[in-house]
Amino acid sequence: MTNPSDVQMERLIQRDTVQEDDLKYEGKPSKAPPTLSVFKMVCVNAFWFGYQVYWFIMSIVVVPKQIEIISGSGNKGSGLAVISFYAGILNLFLAVIFGALNDRHASVYGKRRIFIVIGTVSLSTSLLLLSSEYSLAFYGVGYCAMTLSAIICSVPFNGLIADITPPEQKGTMSAIMGSMSLAGSLAGAVVGVFVETLGIVGIYIVLVAILATTCFVTIVSCEERSTLHLQSLEPIQWKRFFKDLVAPLLENRDFRLVFISRFLFQLGIATVNQFLQYWIGDCVNTTMPSTEAVSLALIPLLVLAPIAAMFIPKKKRKVVVYVASGIMIATCVLLEVATELWMALLIGGLFGMGYGPFISAEFAMLMDVLPSEGEAAKDIALWHSAMVLPQIFATPAAGWLLDYYQSVGSALVPPIHCLGYKVTFALCIIYFAVGTEITRRIEKIE
């Protein structure tokens, strides 16, 4: 399931490219923020580490297992599909709307930190609504509450990073944010290995403790000015806001192709990540619980992805995408035939070797085709919606296909073991192949 904060991350870190009128619109002072020490940048990003630990544990480990318990083994794909669909729609619209409103929030205490605290408290309390003892409908309400809470804290956090980062330090800040994101996911994977030992209550206590601690460190590490002057701004014209938001897709061919390419690749990536736990539980021979095994299988991915990304060429973006796509397609082929846990670990590492270079190259491609440097923030926000859309389309489609073809495979004589997963991962191969072809058609990129 897509992390809501991904819609805002690079959009906000690139804020220094906006025009003077945009700075006035966002309510930011015209004077550049003071230079930050590396230590302070790490402390400010502490919340990002805790947030990523929380999101990894919940979206990869806890939620899929709880939905399986609620829906039953034969309907778990459909159950996950329904939850992902409604949460994805909520995420798609509210992240953008709340971001615009937060930019204009007028308060003597500032406009970012108060919402980071509110969102953190809400994320913690939303765990009370997420239990395998509830119905799927009630669980869906709880998951939507968690999604809304994530938006409330992550969007202002990314805005805070943009507000306090001097233009000359945006590269360093972005690198630290990326490192915190990776470290948080890796820590989440390590914690996930012990999920059965800790139990669901223990896991929730650990997550709340990590969130509270990292939120506190971030809040006390920075200051905000009063934003009461934002009361004088004109109300947002929402029709024009959304019209301007999607205009680059209609007017710029290469930007549109980069958007479509990312959407297709994210369809495949989201499908593999979301159904990996179910695949291990149904198709892999192991005595380890699937909740722990999926965390173990993703550790090689999280370790190798950034290492592989370090070796990509500065140019030849298309070549990087071609190679990365080939690796991820090979991974999907292996997922269709693997039956042992050691193979799952190998597959995780192999996927990371394709995924790391791909995510580095795709952002570089975006920079190459941005329609307007003066409106980079808005265009990057639109590009990031290609990460949310797969939650609305990929997981529901794959979930329903999984359940249908699993039942078909079981009814055949002789039965075809894990037919639903073979169809699901074959679909991912199609996503990657078509995404590669779309990338080939982009004219402005080598």
Image (cartoon, helix red, strand yellow):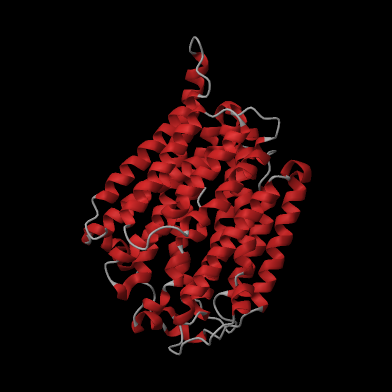
Quadrant location of the C terminus in the rendered image: bottom left
Asked whether the viewer can see residue 238, the reply is no
Residue 26's place in the image compared with 352, above or below, is below
Q: Position of residue 384 (x, y in %)?
A: 41, 59
Kindly identify the residue that appears in the image at 31 percent across and 58 percent down.
Answer: 316
Q: Position of residue 31 (x, y in %)?
A: 45, 90
Residue 432's place in the image compared with 363, above or below, is above
Asked whether the viewer can see residue 333, the reply is yes
Lateral position of residue 58 relative to residue 16, left or right: right
Which quarter of the figure has residue 292?
Answer: top right
Q: Position of residue 375 (x, y in %)?
A: 32, 72
- Furthest-top residue in this view: 413
Tally of numbered discs: 0
Lateral position of residue 44 relative to residue 22, left or right: right
Which is nearer the eye, 182 or 82? Answer: 182
Residue 279's place in the image compared with 242, above or below, is above
Which is nearer the eye, 24 or 323? Answer: 323
Which is nearer the eye, 72 or 326? Answer: 326
Which quarter of the figure has residue 147?
Answer: bottom right
Q: Position of residue 361 (x, y in %)?
A: 39, 58
Kindly identify the residue that appears in the image at 52 percent across and 47 percent down.
Answer: 1
Lateral position of residue 302 relative to residue 62, left or right: left
- Furthest-bottom residue in this view: 31
